[in-house]
Each structure stands twice: as C-alpha cells, then as structure tokens.
Image (cartoon, rainbow, N blue to C red):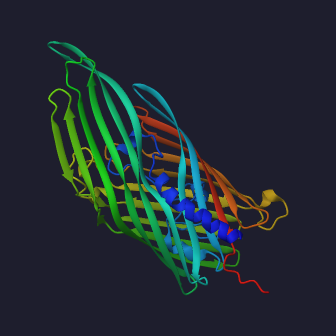
Amino acid sequence: MQRYLHLIIIAFMLPFGGMVCAQNSTSSPYSRYAFGELSNYCPTGYRAMGGVRYGMRNNRTINAAQPASYTACDSMTFMFDLSAFVAWNRQQDGSGMRNKALGNLDYITMQFPLWKQHIAMSLGILPYSMVGYDITLPGSVTSPSGTYTYSRVYAGEGGITDLYGGLSGNLFDWVALGLNAYYMFGEVSNARTLIFDDGGLASVIRMNDIHVSTLRLRGGIQVFHTFGKHSFVLGGVYEHRMNVRGTYTELGTSTVTDSVEYLENSGMQLPSMLGVGGSYIWNNRLTVAVDYERQFWGALHFLEDQEFGRETLTDYNRISLGAEYRHNPYGKNYAERMYWRAGCGFNDSYVKTVKSKDLNVSIGMGFPMRTSATIFNITLEYKRRGLASGLHENSLMLTFGASVRENWFFKRKL
C-alpha cells in the first residue's frame, strides 16, 4: 500500500513541479542577460560541498548533473528526491540598499534500476535558468532649457525549465557511461522604462521576450575503483553546441508619439560545455571532491541584439571544492551516523560587463532515518557577487531536501 501511495504522490507532484520551477527563483539584476541566471542541477547534499557533482557517485543521491552516476543505485531500490529553498538577498549600489526574501521548489528527480546494477534510469524536472529583478534608479539631465529628472526602471521575470530523462550503463566493473535528454521550455521577459517627471516629455519602454521549446543532450562518463579502504571516482560530462528552437521578440514604444517598433529574431544557441571532477573516499566515511566546469558562451552567435546578444557574452568558468564526513555509518549514536558537509566555489559570469568573481561558501548536514534508508538534507549557502565599487549582492540560501529510498523491487517470499 505504501508503494502505491508514493506513486500517487509522485504522479501528482511532477506536473506541479514543472509549473513551479518556471516561476521566479531569483532577485538579481545580473539575471537580465541572455537566458538569465543559470542553475547547476546540483542535489542538496552536494550543494553543501561547494557544488561538486561530476566526480560524485553513491547510492544515496540522485546526481542529475552526471548521467553516468545512475548505476550507483542499488539493484532493488527506487529513489525519489525533492528539494526546496528559502533565501535572503541584499543588493547595494550608489542608489541605496535593497533586501528581498525568496522561496521556491528547486527540483524533483527519481531514479531506479532497469537491469540489476548494469543499467539504470533517472527522470525529473530541473530549473535551467531564472530571471527576476525590479529596480528603479533616479537620474537627471541638464539642457539649455533646464534640468529634467527621470527614473530608469528595470524589470524582468520568468525562467526556463528542463524536463529530463537519462540512462546509464556499466562497462566492465569500473566504467559507467550515461546520457541525458532534456526538453527545455519556458519564457523570460525583460523591460526597460525611462520615465521623466515632466509629463510633457516622452516615456520610452523597451521590452524583449525569449521563448524556448527545444531538445538537447548531455553525455557523461565515470571511472571508479576501490582499493581496500580507499576508493576514487573520476568523471566528466560534455554537451555540444546546438541551435535553440525558440524566438526572441523585442518591442519598443513611446508614450508621446505612440510609435511601436517590433523585431523578431530566432538566432539563439546553447554553448558547448565541459565538466570534469574527481572524488576520493576513505573507509566509506570521508569524501573529498573537486570540480571544474567551462561553458563556451563566447563562441556563440547569439542573437543580433547588442545588449542581450552575442556582443555581451563570454565564457563561463566554475571551480568547486568540498568534503563530507560520516563518523560511523553503523554507529549506535545517531550523531555518528549523520553526514557533515562543507565546501566552497568560485565562478565568473557569462556576461562580459560583469567583471567580478562570485564566491560561494556552504555547510550542511544529512539526517538519516532510523527505520529506513531515507535521508533529509539541509544546506546553508552564503554567496557574494559583484564589485564594491558598483552593484554588489550578498545572499543567504537555506535548502531543504529529502532523498527517499525504498526497496520496491524486492520479491518477498510467501
């Protein structure tokens, strides 16, 4: 009965998750370019380790970022992972300070074996990118006829969501290959408005809208081995550059002349990306991992818009370091069986005008259930973005996740 109840809950949550993931999950002016602020597909437990993922492989976590990792699951276990977050964001620039509270569902994933431990599958809904900001900046201009004050209003919203399915298969006993297929869908909108306090002057509005409905692929490989108490995993993922099925629409209006300018452009692409990582595990207690990722946005012919298109984009780089410790997986003391995690990461923006490096520091814990293999994870992240001389942000994010594991494929004896 419990198994069927889980199926009903999952069937209900999947379409709901697709709707929620597309909603605003950020509040940052840095999300106004191209597709917005990029997500990372990182499960809650690995977020606490600085965001490492490509060299991570275990039977407790669904690692949707690395399709080769799915065969790490037990041959009789169904896994279901759900995550949500709350965040507090502070932005500061020359015009003042702004605070914003956020919260949303993060992702829903599931994983199960298809043939023993040789072939496994994963399905789920993940956010690809997020757009969300609303800022008003005052200003003035002086002319021979006088000084005029105005307000510049920047606003954006939306997001792009990935519905994915992935397969993983083992070669020999030490190599795994995997492939994810993503259906990307969603819409992001940006608006810029210039409003003069003098009603006799024209207010100007420029809006652009990106709509995406396309498919893409990601391949992954992992090499793994155990020597007594020592284990290692080396992994990599790759995506090839591809054209995006979608449209870019720009609209301009003036309140005085009542004119409308309309431009439609479908020249959008996704970049090639390469991610590599490795992890070392000692005695099933201590895990140390490192990741590197590069996305080649600078090589794209992305739109013709000079502000949102190819003239604004550059390559994206990220490096992450993390560790996890569990004192005794079989200890009688509950604290000995808990997971303790910490990590940090650095990345730059894929927008040329954003010169700063982002810093991410995270800690977290995993709480295993006493009567099942289910684990509840919690992660606290601090992020710093921007330069002190311009717009800069500080944020705290608290992420909650539940990794449910059930023996669905165990044949009971009568």
On the image, which quarter does residue 31 sit in? top left
Residue 291 can be seen, yes or no: yes
Q: How many dots with numbers?
A: 0
Residue at image point 52% right, 81% down: 169
Q: Left of 277 or right of it: where is 156?
A: left
389 above or below 74?
above
Q: Residue at x 60, y 54 (%)?
A: 48
Residue 229 vs 6, above or below: the answer is below
- Identify the residue shown where x is 68% and y is 71%: 3
Kindly tell me whether residue 314 is visible in this rendering: no
Q: Measuring 56% from the left and 59% from the top, which residue is drawn there?
A: 13
Residue 391 position by quadrant: top left
Q: Report the front residue among 49 and 193.
A: 193
Residue 175, x across and y down, in percent: 53, 81
* Residue 335, above or below 355: below
Instruction: Give the image location of residue 61, x and y in percent.
Output: 61, 66
Q: Is residue 395 left or right of residue 192?
A: right
Describe residue 125's horizontal placement relative to residue 379 as left or right. Answer: left
Residue 343: x and y, percent? 59, 53
Quadrant in the picture for the N terminus: bottom right
**Where is residue 269 drawn, in percent x and y?**
28, 60
Location of the C terminus by quadrant is: bottom right
Is residue 342 shown above or below 150?
below
